[in-house]
Image (spheres, grey):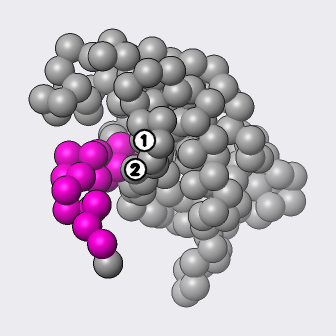
Amino acid sequence: MLITIGSTNPVKVAALTEILGDYPLFAGAEIMGIAVPSGVAAQPMTEQETMDGAMNRARAAYRTDYSFGVESGLKMVPYGRTGYMNFVTCAAFDGREFYLGQSSAFELPIEVINLVLRDGIESGIAFHTLGLTASANLKHEEGTIGILTNGRITRKEYLKEAIRNALILIENKPLYNRSR
């Protein structure tokens, strides 16, 4: 079985590889990262844009059995300090249907959101610009969540949550294919 992921980011490929190892359906699968465009902004600013990016990646990476697209983004939320929360969407695709899952969400610091909104840059780049990390490439490392949780949650673990949630629909297809 060949499984593709619409990214060559080593953190995304590792997260998918580790998760699929827990599922009998994917036992022995070959995982291949493919560089594909997300078709959305480098820093998606809405839930729909983030979901579109994940679906675009999965569709563009589809070759045979299943493909996956994973996209981090921001969504507007009420009551928070900044009005935005960071989250991840995973879209799995079997050539016909999408199976979607999301991660939990967290707020980024106010200065980071202000820089993202003002300059249109990714949150990880904003962290570097503001001196919150020496790394200029957080998305290939521990991620902003790794910085904010002091390593308690890494970007890879955060991505895994969204992937697991998408796999719920694949593993339990009969429950989700019933009529309303």
Where residue 30 sits in the image (x, y, percent)?
Answer: 33, 13
Q: Is residue 158 at all visible to an observer of this figure?
A: no
Q: Amino acid at mark 2?
A: Tyr
Q: What type is the residue that disc 1 sits on?
A: Ala
In percent of width and height, residue 31 lies at: 38, 17
Residue that appears at 45% across and 63% down: 105
Magenta residues (range) = 162-179
Q: Secondary structure at mark 1?
A: strand
Q: Nearer the viewer, residue 125 or 174?
A: 174
* Earlier-in-chain disc, 2 versus 1: 1
Residue at x 50% of width, y 21% of height: 63
The answer to if 102 sits in the magenta stretch is no
Disc 1 crowd rating (10 Å Cα; few below 14, some 14-19, many 20+) is many
Residue drawn at (54%, 36%) of the image: 58
Answer above or below: position of 140 versus 145.
Answer: above
Which numbered tag is attached to residue 76? Answer: none
- Most extreme residue toward the left is 24
Left or right: residue 178 compared with residue 37: left
Cα–Cα gap, marks 2 and 1:
5 Å
Foreground pick, 42 / 178:
178
Residue 54 or residue 81, whichever sits in front? 54
Tell me if 179 is positioned left or right of 69 in this view.
left
Q: Name the residue beneath numbered marker 1.
A: 92
Q: Secondary structure at mark 2?
A: strand
Total residue callouts:
2
